Image (cartoon, rainbow, N blue to C red):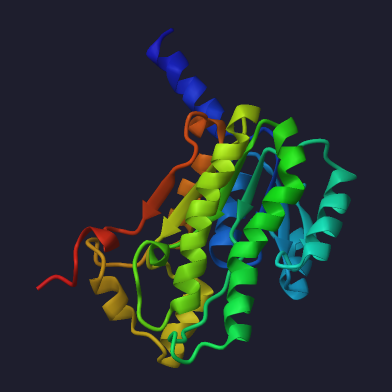
């Protein structure tokens, strides 16, 4: 095989050629960026979000591609996920990848955290991954596809006043390993991605309101800046593609060097 043939094979492995890929949290931030990258690589995007207004715009947006389908669902709800599977199964016999991005945060310390707050974050961030995996596994098995679950660097370290968020993201990392352990014999892969500081609309809102400081966040990285959602999405989509065909049970940290040192530069 020539070098050019090998290059062509590599590029082909990155492409989806119309294959259906589900993205939760598809209406904004990293989820929307994943849809954009998937569209560029020829996937048929199945966009899922609880925000009806955002998803209503998908048919008018080039980000999602002309063949995209949009579904409104709360992926922390067992009933909603079961209904979502039933709807999607009417159109697709198999799914190439499920990318679980949906999530939220709660900046409360363990001293003040209510059980209601804890349960809400766990349901949105962690239970949603379990439900999407359990329901869609048969379709992913048929496509010998993969799951990519979005955790966080905060799932690998402790951070003040982020009790429920850090715990839920740590849970995603090990749930993903467990999924990989149980489905590998069926040719299905599962990996997690831990983004570092990323300039999503939610993060920008936090800066704008004064709840957090952008300069401090940037100083905690070796590259001295925040990631764009697209920079995170490209790694996620690589893991969902056949280019990562021998990668499973892995945790990818995409953080600009945030975890590689213990504080800001002098």
Q: Is residue 176 visible?
A: yes
The N terminus lies in quadrant: top left
Q: Quadrant of residue 64?
A: bottom right
The C terminus lies in quadrant: bottom left
Q: Quadrant of residue 56?
A: bottom right
Q: Is residue 19 visible?
A: no
Give x and y (percent) for residue 81: 78, 59
Give x and y (percent) for residue 245: 52, 29
Residue furthest top as drawn = 1
Residue furthest right as drawn = 90
Relative to residue 246, is residue 67 drawn left or right?
right
Question: Measuring 55% from the left and 58% from the top, which residue is drawn there?
Answer: 33
Is residue 241 depicted above or below 48 in this figure? above
Is residue 209 depicted above or below 127 in this figure? below
Question: Measuring 23% from the left and 73% from the top, which residue is drawn there?
Answer: 219
Relative to residue 24, is residue 246 drawn left or right?
left
Q: Nearer the viewer, residue 179 or 38?
A: 179
Give x and y (percent) for residue 107: 46, 84
Question: Measuring 50% from the left and 46% from the top, which residue is drawn there?
Answer: 177
Give x and y (percent) for residue 89: 85, 45
């Amino acid at each position: 095989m020539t070098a050019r043939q090998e290059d062509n094979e590599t590029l082909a492995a990155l492409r989806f050629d119309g294959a259906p890929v589900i993205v939760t949290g598809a209406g904004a931030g990293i989820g929307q960026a994943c849809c954009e990258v998937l569209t560029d690589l020829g996937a048929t995007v199945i966009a899922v979000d609880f925000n009806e207004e955002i998803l209503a715009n998908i048919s008018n947006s080039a980000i999602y591609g002309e063949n995209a389908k949009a579904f409104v669902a709360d992926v922390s709800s067992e009933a909603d996920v079961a209904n979502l599977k039933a709807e999607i199964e009417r159109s697709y016999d198999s799914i190439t990848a499920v990318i679980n991005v949906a999530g939220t945060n709660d900046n409360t310390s363990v001293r003040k955290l209510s059980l209601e707050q804890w349960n809400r974050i766990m349901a949105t961030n962690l239970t949603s991954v379990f439900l999407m995996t359990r329901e869609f596994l048969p379709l992913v098995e048929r496509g010998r596809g993969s799951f990519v679950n979005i955790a966080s660097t905060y799932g690998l370290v402790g951070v003040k006043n982020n009790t429920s968020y850090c715990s839920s993201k740590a849970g995603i990392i090990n749930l993903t390993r467990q999924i990989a352990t149980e489905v590998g014999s069926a040719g299905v892969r599962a990996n997690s991605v831990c983004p570092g500081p990323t300039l999503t609309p939610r993060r920008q809102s936090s800066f704008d309101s004064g709840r957090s400081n952008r300069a401090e966040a940037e100083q905690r990285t070796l590259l001295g800046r925040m990631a764009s959602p697209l920079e995170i999405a490209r790694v996620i989509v690589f893991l969902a593609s056949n280019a990562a065909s021998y990668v499973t049970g892995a945790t990818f940290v995409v953080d600009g060097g945030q975890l590689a040192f213990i504080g800001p530069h002098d």
